[in-house]
Amino acid sequence: MLAGAKRGEVIMLLKVENLKKYFGNIRSVDGVSFSIQKGETLGLVGESGCGKTTTGRTIIKLYEPTEGRIIYGGQDITSLTPDEMLSFRKKIQMIFQDPYASLNPRMTAGDIIREAMIIHRIPRDEQQDRVNHLLRLVGLNSEQAGRYPHEFSGGQRQRIGIARALAVEPELIICDEPISALDVSIQAQIVNMLEDLQHELGLTYLFIAHDLSMVRHISSRVAVMYLGRIVELAESEELYASPKHPYTVSLLSSIPIPDPDKSDSRETTALQGEIPSALNPPSGCTFHTRCPKAKPECSMLKTQLADTGNGHFCACPFV
């Protein structure tokens, strides 16, 4: 529990204000703002290239922010040096997208999990017991600690990545598309395990994904991102039941429905063209070049998230 917090009190664990990350002239993240309460899961969704992963990596400061503020537990960590960030890295960890590329092939599973403990100076006599416990916690066994990554399946490798993220007992985990590289049969197992771990350990998640149906399953709230900006943010059920932004409407209409009768009768909203380049984004509302409801003035309007009621925020002034 954070210092000064009372039992039952809503705790704002992370707050991001006008976060920007530019790579030269490429505006990967262009003014993102949101907050995450302790114990909840915020889903961050959008097309490939919209800036989701860059947002997550900038929050954990694998990338230095170009502008904006990152406030964790009430403390501004935006300008902290790498040495000063060390204590916060113990509180904020990340699960990476590709379980094949994110594990060192020359290290055993036990050493991969133990590495963070060494960096954060966990007593040596505690490390092996903790490695064994974490392996069991993610559905593996302690006998597998001596095996190398190539001896595991993709789902097992991602379980090792999750155990590594849990090694130093973090409060917030940034899940960067943790299931997108896995077989469909394994994806639900990993998501269910993440939910179980959240309840058991009191974890908070930023869950980055493009699978909208899976995000609905795991998230308390959902933020929809387009070309470096958040265009809609709402409670999960509210957003799926009553999407407001034309981009969100189009994304949700693309979710496959198993029932052929319902699928045939459903109205779909297809997006035209490709997502514009972040090197030269459209003026005004960046979505107006693909929006089926665009008006002439949309090319001049600088849209901002506005509360439309019931904690539902939308960046379209014509909803």
Image (cartoon, rainbow, N blue to C red):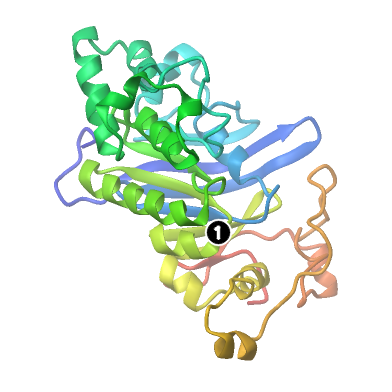
Q: Pointer 1: residues within 10 angstroms few (<14), some, or many (20+)?
A: some
Work out which residue is located at the far left of the displayed protein and give it: 7
Q: Quadrant of residue 218?
A: bottom left
Placement of the C terminus among the 4 image quadrants: bottom right
Tell me the residue at 45%/32% (across/down). 152
Please tell me which residue lies in front, 206 or 181. 181
Tell me the residue at 24%/8% (across/down). 124
For label 1, the residue is 211
Q: Quadrant of residue 58?
A: top right
**How many marks do you count on the picture?**
1
Q: Secondary structure at mark 1?
A: loop
- Lateral position of residue 120 relative to residue 288, left or right: left
Q: Is residue 232 above or below residue 179?
A: below
Residue 308 drawn at (x, y percent): 52, 72
Q: Is residue 110 above or below residue 94?
A: above
Residue 143 drawn at (x, y percent): 28, 25
Tell me the residue at 62%/75% (across/down). 253
Please tell me which residue lies in front, 294 or 92. 92
Residue 165 drawn at (x, y percent): 38, 31
Please tell me which residue lies in front, 125 or 287. 125
The kind of residue on which mark 1 rests is Asp
Please tell me which residue lies in front, 189 or 239. 189
Q: Is residue 122 visible?
A: yes
- Lateral position of residue 169 relative to residue 80, left or right: left
Residue 210 drawn at (x, y percent): 58, 55
Tell me the residue at 81%/50% (across/down). 281
Placement of the N terminus among the 4 image quadrants: top left
Q: Is residue 309 visible?
A: no
